[in-house]
Amino acid sequence: MLGRKLLFFLALAAAVTAADLVTKSIVFSRLPHPGQTVSVIGKTFEIVHHTNTGGMWGVGQSWNPWILRLVRFAAVAVVLVILYQTRPGDRVSVVSLGMIMGGAVGNIHDSLRLGSVRDFLKFDFGFDPFHAFPTFNIADSAICVGVGLLALQMLLSSGAGRKEAGEGSARE
């Protein structure tokens, strides 16, 4: 029987993948032509029809598509290895990894099926570094939030580990 950690991870990854693919489908059915735009908040926030043959935020657009696929599948393997090594009660890591996996699967789906990834969220806050921020999607958002949560957890836990080690040596 599957453990609760794995079931939760799979459920969250499936939910993120579904949200990503459904939102892409809705946007691209309503905006069928490349470059088509709907303003949500002036030029600050727009929904656009945009495709990306590279990685997140357009990185690697000139790369061979097989290299990008290899990198994406390697990322999936790394997520699974980290999940396997995660302690049973470590909910933050499981949530983070589920978000990363769901986003990866959504973008891999597009890449394999369409040869590019569908992006549609465009923000331009009028100042650097958020002036014409690269267009992205729900999968990209989930990956960034998941990686951010993992990084934050690692920073906080390493600080706690150093503090505990320091307290232990002071008592000796």
Image (cartoon, grey):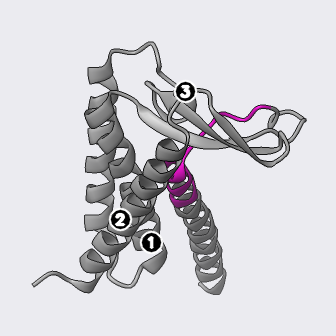
Labels 3 & 2 near each other (Cβ < 8 A): no
**Where is residue 51 shown, x and y percent of the image?**
49, 30
Question: At numbered mark 1, what does the secondary structure look like: helix, strand or loop?
Answer: helix
Above-or-below relation of 61 to 146? above
Residue type for callout 3: Pro
What is the crowding at mark 2: few (fewer than 14 residues within 10 Å), some, or many (at least 20)?
A: many
What's the residue at 38%, 85% (across, down)? Answer: 89
Label tally? 3
What's the residue at 52%, 62% (across, down)? Answer: 150
Label 1: which residue? 95
Label 2: which residue? 13
Task: Look at the image and tell me whether residue 58 can be seen.
Answer: yes
Which of the labelled discs sits on residue 123, or is there none?
Answer: none
The mark that comes first in sequence, 3 or 2, is 2
Q: CA distance from mark 1 to mark 2?
A: 9 Å
Label 3: which residue? 34
Residue type for callout 1: Val
Corner quadrant of residue 129: top right
Of tags 3 and 2, the one toward the viewer is 3
Q: CA distance from mark 1 to mark 3?
A: 34 Å
Which segment did they paint magenta? 132-146
**Where is residue 18 shown, x and y percent of the image?**
37, 62
The mark that comes first in sequence, 1 or 2, is 2
- In this view, the residue in front, 69 or 23, is 23
User: Relative to 140, is 170 on the left or the right?
Assistant: right
